[in-house]
Image (cartoon, helix red, strand yellow):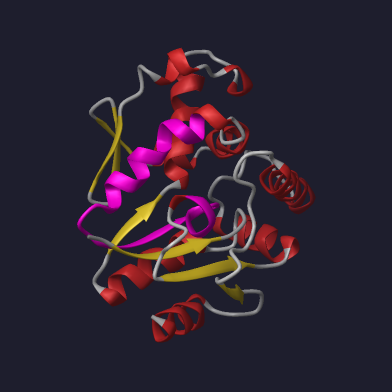
Amino acid sequence: MSTVVAIDGPAGAGKSTVARLVAERLDYSYINTGSLYRALAYAAKASGIAFDKVTPEFLSGCHLEFRGADLYLNGVKLDAELRQPECARGASIISAQSFVRDFLMPVQRNAAAGQWIVMEGRDIGTVVFPDAEKKFFVTASAEERARRRMAQGNEVAAGATFESILADIRSRDERDMNRAIAPLKQADDAVLIDTTGLSIAEVVDRITALC
């Protein structure tokens, strides 16, 4: 048995920080499913494979598992590697492949087995756990997300400008929302939370109150 709080939303909306803090507040486990796609992008890059050339055969050599909130690829814990700008870009490209999503579905569902969890991603409330007890769609304007990313400095390539970061976010939104398989969208029964102008604490308070 598992109890799932699903948090979906676009890149840079603050989902990871919010989901982690909500999990801490509720004393639930925290799972970031986006890290799975980033891990595959990292593996592809390390193997010299273009992100759009990943094959089922390549995936067969990638064993992914969560140990608590930590993600392991073939027995090696991944952390800072997943925050590289290339891995973020590659994740969006790789996730458009239906066989990739099929490959990762059991990994995501197994991570929730027997736990009370907060799981965040792009399609948790629509595809992975459509029957999740609580669903939220966390978003913000593209400009706000670009400002946050630039201020934080994470996942930002050397020499990046506000304009280039904004263009990258809009490009990722376009790919994620218009892919044929499991596009990014708000579940019909999800609560919409626009974090533009809100502090992290305000967003966490709002979600935990609803849980």
x and y percent of residue 83 in the render? 48, 42
- At x 61%, y 68%, the residue is 188
Q: Nearer the viewer, residue 69 or 115?
A: 115
x and y percent of residue 24 in the render? 29, 70
Residue 28 as seen in the image, left or right of residue 51:
left
Q: Nearer the viewer, residue 107 or 204?
A: 107
Residue placed farthest to the front in the image?
131
Q: Nearer the viewer, residue 136 or 71?
A: 136
Total numbered badges shown on the rendered structure: 0
Quadrant of the drawing holding the N terminus: bottom left
Residue 3 as seen in the image, left or right of residue 132:
left
Residue 163 to residue 85: above or below: below
x and y percent of residue 8 in the render? 53, 60
x and y percent of residue 30 in the render? 32, 59
Residue 179 to residue 146: above or below: above
Magenta stretch holds residue 111: yes
Secondary structure mainly formed by the magenta segment = helix
Residue placed farthest to the bottom in the image?
209
Residue span colored magenta: 100-127
- At x 29%, y 53%, the residue is 112
- At x 27%, y 25%, the residue is 74
Residue 190: name its quadrant: bottom right
Quadrant of the drawing holding the C terminus: bottom left
Residue 5 to residue 59: above or below: below
